[in-house]
Amino acid sequence: MVDLKNWLNQQRGKGMLRSLRPVIRRGKGRLTLAGDETQELLDFSSNDYLALAEHPALIAAAQEALRRFGAGSGAARLMSGDLALHHELEEAVACLKGKEAALTFGSGYMANTGAIPALVGRHDCIFSDRLNHASIHDGCRLSGARLVRFRHNDLNHLEELLKEKRGVGTALIVVESIYSMDGDRCPLRELAQLKERFGCLLMVDEAHATGVFGLQGGGVIEEDGVSGAVDLAMGTFGKALGSYGAYVAGNREMIEYLLNRARSFIFSTALPPAVAAASLAAVRLIGQEPALRQELHEKIAYFKALLHKGGYNADLGPSQIIPILVGESGAALNKAELLKKQGIFATAIRPPTVPNGTARLRFSITRHHSPADLAQAAKAILESLGIERG
């Protein structure tokens, strides 16, 4: 058995021990920490990119569903927990992602660890980007398939591996369209060509892209025009859509197959009615109000311009996720504390979430942030790095 005390002490000594500290949300992108309610902080660690968690349409939809159907769904979907509301949500998601059908899951983790093992097994092969989310890696391991990891966003490396290791069974390529810790974007058009050449299935995790990218908010697969080449589009309701849960979307046969094979769907209680209703309201909203995305992207561009003007010369990437690399875990924790004193809440991201030596502060821009908020955060970042100018 692991020596628990020794392990905890070792993690603490390396600056890698995690703990929980409750926050008190004050609305409009602000929070205080339990036990220190006097200091209000600007929240730059939220994934509520479009600020929909507080949107009246989502709140009203959740309240009405709660009143009509109660707090819980009462059972798994294949038992008596299958509501018409779940089907409405899945139809709306399928339309959003340019697919025939969709299936909802309790979380993004459950979607990835359910769908991947259902699609491939021990006679098959998975080609996975090295920086894919932990839930993807775990889904790959659970499948029992041969796992081949390629260098991050390196399609030349992927092509070499496909030539060498593709094999005769089913081959699945798994990527994220927007990577959660680096904020960079997968070259999906070129990837779709590789997928066709080598006869693979392609699964794209759009957790951080849905609602933020695409003319209708359908994500990078919509924006890049590759929806038809993507066999399985996965995403979550708990980020830009402001609710909770996840989905996978594909053709009708694929979704019917997953309904019968994805264990994390089959053996889990259905999403609560209020959650499903809020998610449905969000999916409809992002299609009806493109100004939500436009406003967010304007704020992202403004924040990046402030950092560059102040002397931060690193590439800030193409998305709303902006990592400020620090290096070692202890240094990242120290800078997070310095920023907190200046009213900025930005979580230090440390190994194993990111590779060793790449601890960082991960800034997420949301519609909640005013120009003054963004200027305050940019100034604090530059001062913490000792590079402010202009």
Image (cartoon, rainbow, N blue to C red):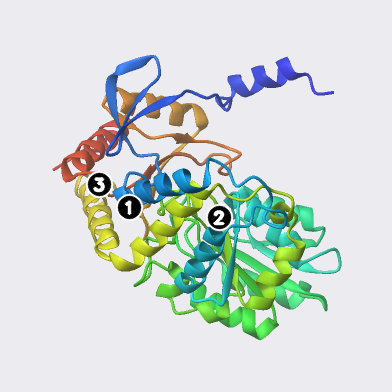
Q: Are marks 2 and 3 in contact (CB under 8 Å)?
A: no
Q: Earlier in the sequence, mark 2 or mark 1?
A: 1
Residue 373 versus residue 126 in the image, above or below: above
Q: Secondary structure at mark 3?
A: helix
Name the mark on residue 341: none
Residue 145 versus residue 348 in the image, above or below: below
379 relative position to 141: left or right: left
- Residue under numbered circle 3: 307
Disc 1 residue crowd, few under 14, some 14–19, many 20+, Cα 10 Å: some
Q: Position of residue 21 (x, y in %)?
A: 47, 23
- Looking at the image, which is closer to me, 386 or 292? 292
Disc 2 residue crowd, few under 14, some 14–19, many 20+, Cα 10 Å: many
In whole angstroms, how far apart are the C-alphas of marks 2 and 1?
20 Å
For badge 1, the amino acid type reads Ala
For badge 2, the amino acid type reads Ala
In whole angstroms, how far apart are the C-alphas of marks 3 and 1?
34 Å
Q: Position of residue 32 (x, y in %)?
A: 34, 24
Q: Secondary structure at mark 2?
A: strand
In front of the other: label 3 or label 1?
A: 1
- Looking at the image, which is closer to me, 118 or 153? 118
For badge 3, the amino acid type reads Leu
Name the mark on residue 57: 1
In front of the other: label 2 or label 1?
A: 1
Q: Earlier in the sequence, mark 2 or mark 3?
A: 2
Q: Are marks 2 and 1 in contact (CB under 8 Å)?
A: no
Residue 307 versus residue 155 in the image, above or below: above
- Looking at the image, which is closer to me, 150 or 112? 112
- Residue under numbered circle 2: 246
